Amino acid sequence: MLLKAEPMRVLGDPDEPRLTFSDEESETSRERFLLVDGKPAFELSFWCGTCQILFQRQQGSTETFSAEGDDPVEAFGGLLPRGDYQPLLLEIRPRLVQPSGPGDYFAEEQVATWGLESFWGLPVYPRTPYYRTFETAVDPDAHLYEFVVPMVPPSWNERAQVDKYIAEPGADPIVAVSVLDVSRPASDDVSDYYTHWALTHFLLDGHHRLQAAAETDFPVRLLSLLAVDFGTAAQSLVARIPGLRAQDPQPRTPAA
């Protein structure tokens, strides 16, 4: 459920943000990363527009974040690189997914479209549990999937804190920086060909509350700072997210 979409705002630290997005070009690919204090925290989808969706945890993803101030958008925005952001307040019902387990996007929907990785002969492996929260049709040939990716795995959370939020959920939103990546396979010689829209929220604050919500199937509010400049999707596609996120959830029926 979309609770509120604020006007787009310029946010971020122009000098030394703690979180940044970068890309590295080699002879064979142009790789993207979310960095924390200059260290790779997640490898992201390639820029090619036909490559598989990706968020793969790296060694720089070891801590959570907090920020103080009356305006959480400005407060958490100060951790991010300077750019345009679309603040969204969402209500989500998170479902924890284990890599290669039931409901894993990478082992199910992605394999149906792209197949297994050609070299490894395996699905993409995100190296982290993550939460699935929402999906809906974009149009007859495209589907939106939403993920919340914790900066540290749920196994790092303190059980007492999770139990506290199960007993008293609280009203403050959890906070994430988000990107929209859009990709479709280069060849239509696949079992289920369509365009994948991946709205990925990298969780900054609220790891215990998110786990508590998943364990109780209870809704929680998410403040998303959607980075317009740092996903693979054009700004015109990012602009569609508030409207898509206001739709009712609609699971996709795989092609026969």
Image (cartoon, rainbow, N blue to C red):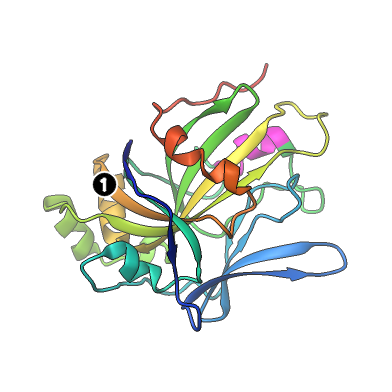
Residue to which mark 1 is pinned: 220
In the rendering, at what x and y percent does residue 131 appear? 42, 48
Instruction: Work out which residue is located at the far left of the displayed protein and give it.
Output: 168
Give the quarter of the figure containing the N terminus: top left
Residue at 83% over, 34% down: 187
> Within the magenta stretch, is there residue 109?
yes
Report the magenta residues as a range.
105-113
Q: Quadrant of residue 44?
A: bottom right
Query: In the rendered structure, which amino acid carries the disc numbered 1?
Result: Val
> Within the magenta stretch, is there residue 242?
no
Residue at 62% over, 21% down: 140
Left or right, residue 85 beside residue 197: left
Residue at 46% over, 70% down: 80
In the rendering, at what x and y percent does residue 156 appear? 36, 67
Q: Residues within 10 Å of mark 1 (few under 14, many from 20)?
A: many
Q: Quadrant of residue 63?
A: bottom left
In the rendering, at what x and y percent does residue 147 appear? 47, 47
Residue at 68% over, 38% down: 111
In the rendering, at what x and y percent does residue 6 appear? 35, 49
Residue 52 visible to the viewer: yes
Residue 198 visible to the viewer: no
Instruction: Work out which residue is located at the far right of the displayed protein and give it.
Output: 27
Mark 1: secondary structure: strand
Residue situated in front as seen by the camera: 254 or 199:
199
